Amino acid sequence: MSRVLLITGGASGIGAEVARLAAAQGYAVAVNYRSKRDKAEALVAGLGGKAIAVPGDVADPSEVEAMFAATEKALGPLTHLVNSAGLYVTQARVEDFDAGDLARLFQVNVIGTMLCCREAVRRMSTARGGKGGAIVNVSSMAATTGGRAGSSAYAATKGAIDVFTQGLAREVAAEGIRANVVRPGFTLTDMTAATAADPRRVAAIAATIPIGRIGTALESAWPIMWLLSDEQASFVSGTAINASGGGFVIGAPAGR
């Protein structure tokens, strides 16, 4: 069976690394973007094989539907989906929350992911004439901790993704679809570039990670590829892989 993969938010960061790995493994790849058209098209041009750049805002239901339709028209029936599109609003404590920021954050990170999963299931489900497939949703270690200071709203969206994916996996398991989560820790991407540009902040964050450094996008892309693989992860569904460098440092016991 030919493998057709759609990656939301695939123009940069973790999504772009997944696109490179998938193309090298023979997947036909659709790279979704909202505003990074130049990056998406440059990425696709370098992939070789069957690859396209597909515009669409995951927060807009009509654009989500169009994105999936365009992917299948160009590449054939969808078999794999990676939901990598995500938004991080300015850090804010609870008392400083802006309702508009919260609405956009949840619309992109949660509802957008759910809508993309809906479209994927409609196409992959054997109960609907599909041939099955695999979905990987990109979450965050923030979902397990509530996030770093000022990131509780972002963490809440990722916690929602974790719980949703567990339910999704159970609903569609008998229809040939696997659904899993990868939770990156602090990772160098466009989203974190401003923080990563400050050596002092990088050092402070690295000190909270057992491995002692921040992660790369490629280090999250490889676990995603493993979960997509029917050969290697055929019995894995409803679970999460933490690509986090060991989680978080816990203070040493007294006397050490």
Image (cartoon, rainbow, N blue to C red):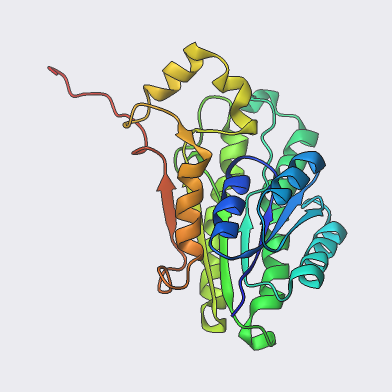
Compared across the picture, whether 209 is left or right of 26 comes to left
Residue 35 appears in the rendering: no
Where residue 25 appears, as percent x and y from the top left, is 53, 62
Where residue 133 appears, as percent x and y from the top left, is 58, 74
The mark total stands at 0
Compared with 121, 39 (above or below) is above
Compared across the picture, whether 72 is left or right of 238 comes to right
Compared with 8, 255 (above or below) is above
Q: Quadrant of residue 28?
A: bottom right
Q: Residue at x 58, y 17 (%)?
A: 197
Front residue of 209 and 142: 209
Q: Residue at x 43, y 17 (%)?
A: 204
Q: Residue at x 55, y 14 (%)?
A: 198
Where residue 161 appears, as percent x and y from the top left, is 58, 53
Residue at the extreme left of the image, as rendered? 255
Compared with 233, 18 (above or below) is above
Front residue of 11 and 135: 11
Q: Residue at x 63, y 46 (%)?
A: 16
Where residue 208 appears, as percent x and y from the top left, is 38, 25
Query: Which of the image's four quarters has the N terminus?
Result: bottom right
